[in-house]
Amino acid sequence: MQVLVRDNNVDQAMRVLKKKMQREGIFREMKQRKAYEKPSERKAREKSEAIRRARKAARKQAQRDGLLPAPKAKPRPQNRARPAVTAAPPPAKA
């Protein structure tokens, strides 16, 4: 996984890296590997995850078919506009 650091802004690069790791499920996997998981617990967890995925897929399909109303759109935060950088006029000669 690679993150570019722009203008020595390490804090922003860390946020981007954490977001990517969250999306990939690395934090969840690290938490699971912290302690031993019995095979019976693993099977139960995987089964419940599969059921959750199946329900989500069925819900999405029902929404596409028009059987369920579409979810309300979340309001997205407005991007903060960067200040316009304008070139200073050349100094007037006397």
Image (cartoon, rainbow, N blue to C red):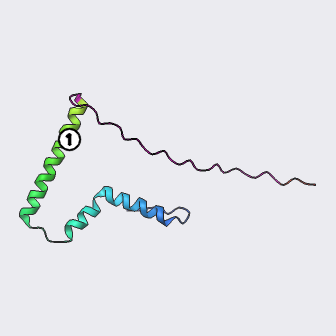
Amino acid on which the number 1 mark rests in the picture = Ala
64 relative to 93 in the view: left or right: left
Q: How many labels does the image show?
A: 1
- At x 8% / y 67%, what residue is drawn? 38
Q: Quadrant of the N terminus?
A: bottom left
In the rendered image, residue 17, in percent from the top left (x then y), is placed at 40, 62
Query: Is 83 drawn above or below residue 43 in the view shown?
Result: above
- At x 20% / y 41%, what residue is drawn? 57
44 relative to 1 in the view: left or right: left
The outermost residue toward the left is 40
48 relative to 88 in the view: left or right: left
In the rendered image, residue 24, in percent from the top left (x then y), is placed at 30, 57
The front one of 1 and 92 is: 92
The front one of 79 and 53 is: 79
Q: Quadrant of the C terminus?
A: bottom right
- Where does label 1 land, which residue? 57
In the rendered image, residue 88, in percent from the top left (x then y), is placed at 76, 52
Q: Which secondary structure dominates the residues rendered in magenta?
A: loop
In the rendered image, residue 82, in percent from the top left (x then y), is placed at 58, 50
Q: Is mark 1 on a helix, strand or loop?
A: helix
The outermost residue toward the right is 94
69 relative to 88 in the view: left or right: left
Can residue 81 be found in the magenta stretch? yes
Magenta residues, as a range?
A: 65-90
Query: Is 68 drawn above or below residue 40 in the view shown?
Result: above
The front one of 71 and 36 is: 71
